[in-house]
Image: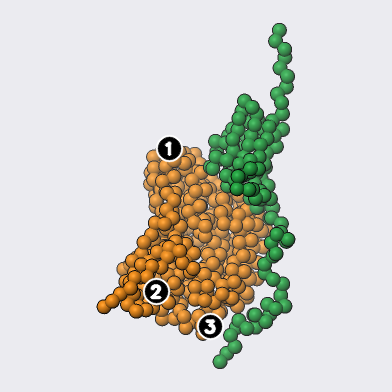
């Protein structure tokens, strides 16, 4: 059998970030895919032993431009558990609100990119128009559109007034009909369904075996969400968005569900704000080690922190969701058509700068 | 076959205001909280150098002997850490972003000099 090898990436119109696959093709059919990563490694983990642990939050936020808040929060929470620092309830609620707002923004970004990948440019622009409003909310509350610099070890750096929070929550609720208009196209439109349904099916058993995380895992019918059982989400009513089919359209449906769910969580949290301060005082330097698992828009991220009693940490390690999902993509690509490859890669919502740090 | 839901949306768009702005002609005002850039009130500064030590990107340079304080706006992350740690609260956060500079980075450094020291009593 004569095969051809087609390189896809690291620069490719559909990939927002550099990820490379060498696709072994038999005619149009992919028979093997060899991924290569490491194009944008920046060595941010190695900066942790060289910076003060409180200042490192700013670097942790810069790991990723989309889930920057989540990275800052995950790092801070890991350090807080080493310090056994009690974070005030209001700070935790503000973290929930900003984390869910990040999820809305990230999923809207993904929906836009997905629409662009399957060639629906109008839908892409309409989705990003709505995302822009969410970015404005970020700028109004934190001062930045991408990098927020609002979380710190022990709580939050800035308070957000209750009035601003309820205004944001009501603006999001008012956005719902517009969102529904857009997401209905993703859910019901013939073209979208034709392109995504039945494509790259990942059965539940395989999803578990490959260690897939996040919306990708939930689309295969597994109820797994790190927010479940997280004390930050105590008292909020919501349930994990799960789909059974395991194909590209199911991954899209999970993300659409999560957008509306996040808006509801924000409304619940903004309606019951505590008033017990926004930051706990740090009395010592971290001595010991801790793990923290956070549910990012792309899935579960793991933060590991080890301190030795000085101002500098000994080790900081971060496992991002994209890294967990890449083996599954390699598996899914085998046997598909070349034209479907960009769409399949995109359905894991790859965030390469996160993955390589 | 049902009409694609995008067709009514596309028709409605013909009569709506555009979602984008003609940027250089029409500039949106920054929000009050927008982290744009920092500046300093030199009359109140004691040139202690704490902001220089705490700056994560080493954008601030303070020379105590000459009473000068300068910030490289292109290095500055606008994290506002200096605003928090300043003992005299004389570093100010501005919501306006710094203007773009040329490739030589000229003009990106903002330098402030403190008031001249009061004349010392003549030695007897």
Q: Position of residue B83 (x, y in %)?
A: 62, 41
Q: Chain of mark 1?
A: A
Can you name the residue that lies furthest to the bottom here?
B1
Q: Are marks 2 and 1 on the same chain?
A: yes
Q: Which residue is mark 2?
A: A220
Residue for point 47% across, 62% down: A17
- Choose the circle earlier in sequence order: 2 or 3: 3
Q: Does residue B24 show up?
A: yes
Q: CA distance from mark 2 to mark 3?
A: 22 Å
Residue for point 56% across, 62% down: A101
Can you name the residue that lies furthest to the top here?
B124
Q: Which residue is mark 3?
A: A189
- Choose the circle earlier in sequence order: 2 or 1: 2
Tell me, by letter, which chain the rendering colours green.
B
Count of numbered badges drawn on the protein = 3
Camera-side residue: B121 or A307? B121
Rendered colour, chain A: orange
Q: Chain of mark 3?
A: A
Mark 3 closeness class: few <14, some 14–19, many ≥20 residues within 10 Å: some
Q: Which residue is mark 1?
A: A310
Q: As displayed, is residue A211 above or below residue B40?
A: below
Q: Quadrant of residue A23?
A: bottom left
- Choose the circle earlier in sequence order: 3 or 1: 3
Q: CA distance from mark 3 to mark 1?
A: 57 Å
């Amino acid at each position: 059998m004569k095969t051809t090898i087609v390189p896809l990436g690291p620069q490719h119109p559909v990939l927002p970030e550099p990820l490379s696959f060498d696709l072994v093709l038999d005619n149009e059919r992919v028979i093997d895919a060899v991924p290569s990563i490491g194009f944008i490694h920046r060595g941010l983990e190695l900066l942790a032993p060289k910076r003060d642990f409180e200042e490192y939050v700013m670097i942790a936020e810069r790991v990723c431009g989309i889930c920057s808040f989540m990275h800052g929060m995950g790092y801070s929470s890991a350090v807080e558990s080493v310090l056994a620092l009690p974070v005030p309830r209001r700070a935790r609620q503000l973290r929930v609100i900003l984390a869910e707002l990040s999820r809305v923004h990230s999923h809207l970004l993904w929906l836009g990119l997905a629409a662009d990948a399957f060639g629906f440019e109008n839908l892409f622009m309409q989705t990003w128009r709505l995302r822009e409003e969410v970015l404005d909310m970020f700028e109004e509350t934190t001062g930045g559109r991408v990098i927020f610099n609002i979380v710190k070890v022990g709580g939050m750096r800035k308070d957000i007034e209750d009035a601003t929070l309820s205004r944001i929550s009501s603006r999001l609720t008012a956005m719902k009909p517009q969102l529904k208009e857009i997401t209905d196209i993703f859910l019901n439109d013939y073209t979208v369904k034709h392109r995504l349904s039945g494509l790259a099916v990942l059965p539940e058993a395989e999803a578990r075996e490959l260690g897939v995380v996040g919306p990708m895992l939930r689309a295969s019918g597994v109820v797994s969400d790190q927010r479940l059982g997280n004390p930050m989400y105590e008292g909020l009513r919501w349930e994990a968005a799960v789909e059974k089919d395991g194909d590209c359209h199911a991954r899209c449906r999970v993300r659409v569900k999560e957008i509306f769910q996040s808006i509801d969580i924000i409304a619940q949290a903004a309606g019951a704000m505590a008033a017990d301060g926004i930051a706990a005082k740090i009395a010592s330097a971290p001595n010991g080690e801790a793990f923290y698992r956070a549910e990012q828009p792309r899935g579960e991220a793991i933060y590991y922190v080890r301190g030795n009693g000085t101002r500098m940490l000994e080790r900081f390690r971060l496992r991002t969701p994209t890294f967990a999902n890449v083996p599954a993509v390699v598996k899914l690509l085998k046997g598909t058509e070349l034209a479907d490859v960009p769409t399949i890669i995109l359905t894991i919502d790859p965030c390469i700068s996160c993955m390589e740090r | 076959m049902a009409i694609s839901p995008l067709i009514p949306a596309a028709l409605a768009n013909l009569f709506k205001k555009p979602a984008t702005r003609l940027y250089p002609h029409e500039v949106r005002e920054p929000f009050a909280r927008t982290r744009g850039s920092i500046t300093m009130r030199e009359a109140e500064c004691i040139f202690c150098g704490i902001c220089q030590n705490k700056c994560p990107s080493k954008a601030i340079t303070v020379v105590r002997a000459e009473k000068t304080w300068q910030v490289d706006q292109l290095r500055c992350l606008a994290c506002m850490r200096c605003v928090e740690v300043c003992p005299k609260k004389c570093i100010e956060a501005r919501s306006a972003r710094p203007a773009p500079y040329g490739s030589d980075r000229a003009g990106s450094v903002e330098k402030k000099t403190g008031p001249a020291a009061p004349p010392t009593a003549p030695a007897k």
